[in-house]
């Protein structure tokens, strides 16, 4: 089934909260997997009672769920972390053999993606192809940092492990007016096929975009000219997958693609790759971390503090872990001094894993230094972020997500204890753990598990080194016993 990200965070939370959040989004030029409605559109959808149906449709597309291959990889890695933590031999890599059908865009190495630009007889393009090419694949020397280039952003996010290259084809101009396009899945795919056939006839090699050899082009970004339509309509921005299994080009079928406007305010404005950066997170297999429906399950997502929530800042340490960019250190018993470099620059984080023994990849706390460097430059302050992760599975999928489950897959612990995110609000500087802050069984929020049981997790003695941009703290986990060895980090007595 096609997977389409169709809604913005906090759509069905109280009206004033939504209006405020959307106003911030519009003014801040933020765009999500499916672009959120404007304040005026939202008022219309509330008035005509269509908003609930639109949000319900979003759930059926499944973009709040992680790609199965990433899930299996993360389970394998976490179990090996747990085994190493217990002094056991690692699992044989041969046990990690997900089906080929689960493969998507590779998360490491050199990966080629394709952008196709489509114009219409009555809707001329405004942006030169070379501008789009530079904003997608350029070296990152232009304006707009840290979103100056898709390639530059992911080079930094992955610590140099993912190199995105590619080509931009277009503008291909159809002979018909845009109104002649049939506004259905088939109509959209026929338009894409027409453009691809044109460039295939000119000799372009499409086989180069099958990076993992599974017979599919991994990811295409499709841009179109003209005005955008109503929210969640055909002429809106979203990601989906190609349905037509009979179509192929250079022996390759089509996989995931994003469908988006050249310019939101066409024919004015200028092109930005921010939407492409978020959509590429989906192509890599990440879920949306925002809350699709404030009336069902947990509220607030991660408060906008992540690229897969509000197109803001870097990917969080949990996402980097499942994408194979970062391997956290683990502390499951004892107390240690820890020093973390900024996760925007170094692949460092700490799992406080009190249930590591016998319950690999279950519920734990993940700590990272979110200093305002590199992709995290736009964030509100410097400090530690503490994530409550519940990555338990049923053998096929996570039991929890950030939209509909009883509690979240990924929850940001708010250092100020105000729980504004859990009420549908946004993250702010008060949610960071800084000097004088602490986290433990007797703080608000507390370090208890979702079942209310004490985890034994504590974080205190926090200090920020403004010269080195490192953050030191004391970490404790488990009921006691010998402290664990560090994995990749120095955990001193």
Image: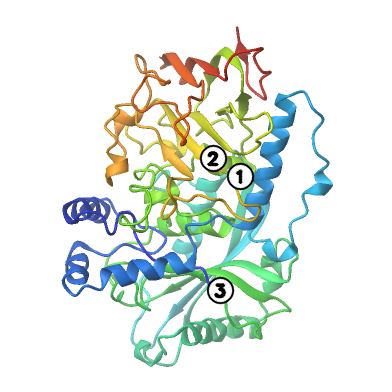
88 or 313: nearer the eye? 88
Rendered residue at 41%/89% (across/down): 181
Q: Is residue 347 visible?
A: yes
| Residue 322 - label | 1
Q: Which residue is mark 3?
A: 1
Rendered residue at 38%/88% (across/down): 121
Sequence order check, earlier mark of 2 and 3: 3
- The label nearer to you, 1 versus 3, is 3
The secondary structure type at the circle numbered 3 is loop
Circle 2/circle 3 CB separation < 8 Å: no
Q: Quadrant of residue 82?
A: top right
Mark 1 crowdedness (10 Å alpha carbons): few <14, some 14-19, many ≥20:
many
The span from disc 2 to disc 3 (Cα, nearest Å) is: 27 Å
Where is residue 268? Give x, y as percent.
27, 68
Sequence order check, earlier mark of 1 and 3: 3
Q: Quadrant of the N terminus?
A: bottom right
443 or 218: nearer the eye? 443
């Amino acid at each position: 089934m096609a997977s389409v990200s169709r809604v913005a965070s906090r759509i069905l939370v109280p009206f004033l909260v939504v209006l405020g959040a959307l106003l911030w989004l519009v003014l801040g030029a933020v765009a999500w997997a499916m672009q959120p409605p404007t304040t005026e559109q939202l008022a219309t959808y509330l008035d005509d009672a269509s908003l609930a149906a639109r949000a319900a449709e979003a759930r059926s597309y499944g973009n709040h769920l992680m790609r199965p291959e990433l899930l299996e990889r993360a389970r394998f890695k976490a179990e090996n972390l747990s085994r190493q933590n217990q002094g056991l031999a690692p699992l044989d890599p041969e046990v990690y053999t997900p089906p080929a059908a689960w493969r998507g865009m590779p998360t490491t190495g050199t990966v080629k993606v394709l952008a196709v630009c489509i114009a219409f007889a009555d809707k001329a393009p405004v942006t030169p192809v070379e501008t789009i090419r530079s904003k997608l694949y350029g070296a990152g020397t232009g304006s707009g940092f840290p979103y100056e280039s898709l390639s530059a952003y992911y080079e930094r996010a992955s610590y140099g492990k993912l190199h995105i290259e590619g080509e931009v084809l277009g503008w291909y101009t159809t002979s018909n007016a845009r109104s002649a396009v049939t506004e259905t899945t088939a109509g959209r795919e026929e338009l894409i096929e027409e453009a691809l056939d044109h460039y295939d006839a000119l000799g372009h090699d499409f086989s180069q975009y099958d990076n993992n050899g599974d017979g599919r082009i991994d990811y295409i970004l499709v841009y179109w000219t003209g005005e955008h339509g109503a929210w969640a309509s055909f002429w809106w921005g979203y990601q989906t997958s190609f349905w037509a299994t009979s179509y192929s080009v250079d022996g390759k079928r089509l996989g995931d693609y994003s469908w988006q406007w050249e310019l939101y305010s066409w024919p004015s404005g200028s092109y930005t790759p921010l939407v492409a950066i978020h959509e590429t997170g989906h192509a890599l297999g990440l879920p949306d971390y925002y809350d699709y429906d404030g009336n069902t399950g947990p509220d607030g997502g991660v408060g906008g503090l992540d690229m897969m929530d509000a197109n803001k800042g870097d990917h969080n340490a949990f996402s980097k872990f499942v994408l194979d960019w970062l391997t956290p250190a683990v502390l499951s018993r004892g107390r240690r001094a820890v020093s973390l470099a900024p996760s925007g620059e170094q692949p460092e984080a700490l799992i406080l894993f009190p249930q590591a023994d016998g319950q690999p990849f279950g519920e734990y706390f993940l700590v990272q230094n979110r200093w305002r460097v590199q992709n995290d430059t736009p964030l509100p302050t410097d400090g530690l972020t503490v994530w409550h992760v519940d990555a338990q599975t049923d053998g096929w999928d996570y039991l929890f997500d950030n939209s509909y489950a009883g509690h979240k897959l990924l929850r940001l612990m708010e250092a100020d204890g105000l729980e504004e995110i859990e009420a549908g609000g946004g993250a702010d500087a008060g949610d960071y753990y800084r000097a004088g802050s602490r986290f433990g069984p007797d703080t608000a929020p507390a370090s208890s598990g979702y079942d209310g049981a004490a985890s034994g997790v504590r974080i205190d003695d926090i200090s920020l080194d403004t010269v080195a941009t490192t953050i030191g703290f004391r970490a404790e986990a488990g009921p006691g016993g010998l402290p664990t060895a560090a994995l990749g980090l120095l955990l001193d007595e």
